Image (spheres, rainbow, N blue to C red):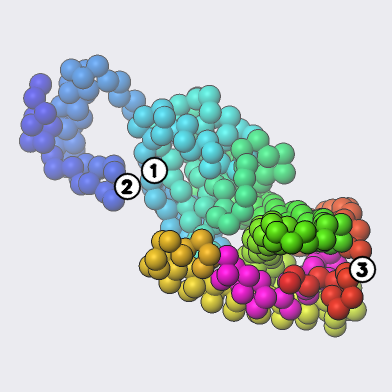
Amino acid sequence: MARRDLHDCAQPLPGEDGTSTLANADAAAARRALTALTRLAADQDMTLTARSRGWLGDTADRTAGLLPGSWRSRIEVYAMPVWQQDLAECVWDAGDLIDAVRSKRVPFGSVLTDERGTELLVADKPGAADELLIGVLAPKGLNGPFADDPTAPPSLTVPADPVLAAQAITASLLPAYQHAVYDRQVQEVGNRLAHALSAQIARVLVRRSWPADDGTGIGAVILGQLDHAHHEALWDDFRSFLQHGPALLDHLEMVAEPIRPAVQTVLPALREALRHGRRVNSQWLDTVRRMRDADSTLAGTAYAQAAAQRTADARPALAAWLEHGPALVDLARLHPPAGARPAAPRALPPAAPADPPGKRRGTTS
């Protein structure tokens, strides 16, 4: 059976997702196409599977249309097992979906995406004729790992019915996903803040115990290098607040009444730190882009000087973050979104020792 025999039976309609469909309005033409396809598959030592249930892509399209907000769907083909294994790093689950992706054959799936970038993976459940597996894909902007995370939004097993699938997603999966993202954001901001506060303490201790200048200038050079490394690490930690702080502040500002004192002091200070930090970050990105075109022999020195200037410009925002950040993390853990159980506050490092004369706690000079 030649390949052209299938082409002669009907014209396949290619889709953007890599799949093709054959129109079945003409029953006789569809029968000829299926017969030709079966013979061609046998010649290539391939197996065809026929099912009475609908195509996953159609089910996913209808499901997307029933979800709250604006959703679209696309089919992904994992024709080779290695492609399927790559998917395992992206599935945020500790249940049936990640187990199927790792240990069973999942030749294709449908990804549902909303306007905020939420991505859900829908796949036929291996070994089940009329069931779907639905879970979430790792969101952008959060640190992994995601597979086997015990706090992951649990994947669903639902009937292959768009109405029932949409109801389960809306009632269970999406709320669990929103709570899990919130918890990850709080965790990342808290971990980064704890690291920054510990680094501040260490920096104060190093400066206080640093030996006097011996006249060679070597000590000053080393101390300058240590300061540069500290500023780089501090800025990297602060970027977590720039990224996740808006969502946490928005949520806590809506809570308002139970945390009235914080609404009047802590949250406004952090909101201003966020605005200031974003402005400095935008300027910093412009500086980095300009330096990419600069003389490579000056790049190291120029970068260090620019980084020091960035830290100096951001000093008020950094100071407010270091001072009020612990309260933000505690409030975020005690007042999660509705329906989520409050997490017990975790202790942050103790306050840094008093700075030398002329310094304020939280400054980054």
Q: CA distance from mark 1 to mark 3?
A: 57 Å
Quarter-wise, where is residue 362 in the image? bottom right
Image position, residue 10 (x, y; %): 13, 39
Q: Residue at x 32, y 47 (%)?
A: 17
Q: Is residue 77 left or right of residue 286?
A: left
Residue at the spot of label 2: 17
Number of other residues with Cα within 10 Å of mark 3, as a class: few under 14, some 14 to 19, many 20 or more: few
Q: Secondary structure at mark 3?
A: loop
Q: Is residue 204 left or right of residue 49?
A: right
Image position, residue 87 (x, y; %): 48, 38
**Dot 1 or dot 3, earlier in sequence:** 1
Q: Is residue 6 magenta?
A: no
Tell whether label 3 touches label 1 (CB within 8 Å). no
**Magenta segment range?**
304-330
Number of other residues with Cα within 10 Å of mark 2, as a class: few under 14, some 14 to 19, many 20 or more: few
Q: Quadrant of the C terminus?
A: bottom right
Q: Residue at x 18, y 42 (%)?
A: 12
Residue at the spot of label 3: 354
Q: The residue under label 3 is which amino acid type?
A: Ala
**Dot 2 or dot 3, earlier in sequence:** 2
Q: The residue under label 1 is which amino acid type?
A: Glu
**Dot 1 or dot 2, earlier in sequence:** 2
Q: Residue at x 88, y 69 (%)?
A: 355
Image position, residue 84 (x, y; %): 44, 33
Tell whether label 2 touches label 1 (CB within 8 Å). yes
Residue at the spot of label 1: 76
Instruction: Examine the rendered structure and indicate whether residue 101 appears above or below residue 154.
Output: above
